[in-house]
Image: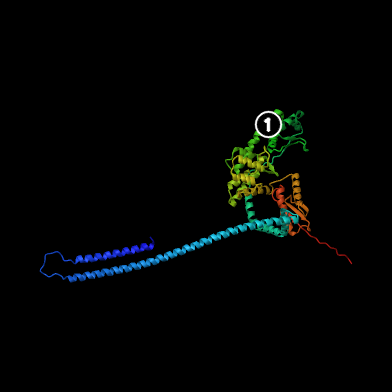
């Protein structure tokens, strides 16, 4: 049954109901107008004509009411019919629009798929053409693709050399202008806090004897005393030093040298030098030196504000008391580095505890003599074995830039170590090492093209490079100084910093002759 049919049924139902209501009203009126069933009276009754007239009026009113209800129902039906027709037309229109859109979407999808296939085909065709062109170019130019790239990059580098030199100079000037004053303040303040109460002992490897007769006692009959001494201590004894009444002790292990020195000094004072007494004196000297190292390690750690370190760590750390680097005592250097790093960390907002501990232990690998490897590798291995925090291990591993810096604390320890070694009077070196370092600096600078002469001056703090003016122009001079400095950092070991100065000079000469 359709919606329209349902509406008609509703309207018919309403009309029937209204007719029934009208009939009910007529019936009620007729009943109400019936005479009551009472005893006959003497008065006359109402004429029947009045009742008929009232009935006709009621019937007319009912018909009018029925007609009115029917008319209202018909109007309501027409209105509902028009709304239903409009709704059906609207739905039909929407269905038609939806079908049109679906057809359009399907068509567009087909077009997109077709274009995608065409695009893939074109890309494949272009890639094929590109490979063909590359092959033709390589054949014509007799160069591979990598060789062509290298040639292009070389040409670009030559074209941009002026800009590179300019950028380097601008960056250097800007950094110098903005940072110089602040850096001076921070570094001077940190160096002031790096002052320590610990006094380093520069142990000597020579012993002065009271007379030449004592040399004979030390040698013993058929050299048995000196052989027993060298076997017990593990050092070499040099009697012929060119200086009267002097003996030199030689060993790569500074602790062994200290034990041998202490034992020999006691034997000389005692005067009774025999193989049995030598072993006894060496054993006692070894115990005293080990006790001294452990006590010194604890003292320096407490001065740096580091507590609760394991005895094995303190004992190994104390061995640095007898280790020198460029004449600088490594135990004193460790304490200085720890205090400077702690102050720098306070200025820069870094972890002071990590920097202080890392600065104290950054060179502990130098005390490990039983294994092969650099002091950085040995130090990192020892700290990992003792389960130190990863941040401390990273600082030790990176303080010579063997690995990239991973934290601000690593940079601070690196800087503190450089300050400790570069401050005036911190280091000194022998003539042979000094001469070798100057030669290495000059050799590195001479390895660049266009360099005419090189002079290492100011005890190796500066390298003057004189270039050939016809080969190196002003822009290349700036870049050359930067390249030389970078190569020196990688290949030469030196304290502090080295200034590289490139000099380019052009002279024009002529002569005025007399007429």
- The image shows residue 281 at horizontal and vertical percentages of 68, 31
Q: Mark 1: few, some, or many residues within 10 Å (few <14, many ≥20)?
A: many
Picture layout, residue 139 above or below residue 355: below
Instruction: Tell me which residue sits at (64%, 42%) in the image.
Output: 379
Instruction: Tell me which residue sits at (60%, 45%) in the image.
Output: 392
Task: Give whichever of 14, 329 is nearer the camera.
Answer: 14
Q: Is residue 475 visible?
A: yes
474 with respect to 383 (left or right): right
Task: Give whichever of 452, 156 is nearer the camera.
Answer: 156
136 with respect to 122 (left or right): right
Q: How many marks?
A: 1
Residue furthest out toward the left? 42
Task: Give whichever of 171, 22 is nearer the camera.
Answer: 22
Quadrant in which the N terminus is drawn: bottom left
Instruction: Tell me which residue sits at (62%, 45%) in the image.
Output: 394
- The image shows residue 150 at horizontal and vertical percentages of 72, 54
**Within the image, what quadrant is residue 380 found in?**
top right
Q: Is residue 199 visible?
A: no
Q: Which residue is mark 1?
A: 281
The scheme the figure's colours follow is: rainbow
- The image shows residue 289 at horizontal and vertical percentages of 65, 36
SS class, disc 1: helix
Quadrant in which the C terminus is drawn: bottom right
- The image shows residue 241 at horizontal and vertical percentages of 77, 37
Task: Give whichever of 4, 384 is nearer the camera.
Answer: 4
């Amino acid at each position: 049954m359709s919606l329209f049919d349902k509406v008609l049924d509703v309207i018919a139902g309403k009309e029937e109901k209204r007719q029934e209501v009208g009939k009910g009203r007529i019936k009620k009126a007729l009943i109400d107008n019936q005479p009551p069933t009472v005893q006959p009276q003497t008065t006359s009754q109402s004429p029947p004509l009045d009742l008929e007239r009232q009935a006709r009026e009621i019937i007319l009113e009912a018909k009018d009411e029925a007609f009115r209800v029917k008319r209202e129902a018909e109007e309501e039906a027409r209105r509902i019919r028009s709304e239903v027709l409009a709704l059906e037309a609207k739905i039909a229109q929407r269905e038609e629009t939806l079908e049109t859109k679906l057809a359009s979407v399907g068509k567009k999808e087909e077009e997109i798929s077709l274009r995608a296939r065409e695009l893939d085909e074109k890309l494949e065709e272009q890639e094929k053409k590109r490979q063909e062109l590359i092959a033709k170019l390589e054949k014509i130019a007799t160069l591979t693709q990598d060789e062509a790239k290298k040639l292009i990059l070389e040409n670009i580098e030559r074209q941009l050399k002026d800009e590179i030199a300019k950028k380097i100079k601008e960056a250097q000037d800007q950094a110098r202008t903005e940072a110089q004053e602040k850096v001076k303040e921070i570094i001077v303040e940190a160096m002031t806090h790096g002052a320590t109460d610990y006094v380093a002992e520069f142990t000597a490897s020579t012993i002065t004897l009271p007379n030449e007769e004592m040399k004979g006692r030390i040698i013993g009959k058929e050299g048995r005393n000196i052989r027993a001494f060298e076997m017990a201590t593990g050092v070499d004894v040099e009697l012929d030093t060119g200086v009267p009444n002097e003996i030199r002790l030689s060993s790569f292990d500074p602790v062994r040298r200290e034990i041998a020195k202490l034992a020999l000094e006691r034997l000389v004072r005692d005067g009774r030098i025999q193989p049995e007494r030598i072993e006894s004196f060496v054993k006692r000297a070894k115990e005293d030196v080990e006790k001294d190292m452990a006590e010194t390690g604890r003292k320096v750690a407490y001065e740096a504000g580091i507590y609760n370190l394991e005895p094995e760590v303190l004992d190994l750390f104390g061995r640095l008391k007898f280790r020198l680097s460029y004449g600088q005592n490594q135990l004193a250097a460790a304490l200085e580095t720890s205090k400077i790093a702690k102050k720098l960390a306070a200025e820069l907002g870094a972890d002071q505890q990590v920097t202080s501990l890392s600065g104290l232990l950054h060179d502990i690998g130098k005390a490990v003599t039983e294994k092969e490897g650099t002091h950085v590798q040995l130090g990192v291995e020892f700290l990992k074995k003792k389960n130190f925090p990863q941040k401390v291990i990273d600082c030790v591993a990176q303080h010579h830039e063997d690995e990239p810096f991973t934290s601000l604390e690593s940079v601070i320890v690196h800087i503190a170590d450089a300050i400790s070694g570069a401050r005036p009077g911190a280091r000194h070196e022998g003539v042979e090492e000094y001469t070798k370092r100057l030669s290495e600096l000059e050799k590195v600078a001479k390895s660049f093209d266009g360099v005419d002469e090189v002079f290492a001056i100011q005890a190796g703090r500066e390298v003057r490079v004189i270039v050939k003016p016809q080969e190196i122009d002003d822009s290349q001079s700036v870049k050359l100084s930067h390249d030389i400095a970078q190569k020196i950092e990688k290949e030469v070991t030196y304290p502090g910093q080295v200034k590289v100065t490139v000099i380019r000079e052009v002279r024009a000469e002529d002569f005025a002759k007399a007429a």
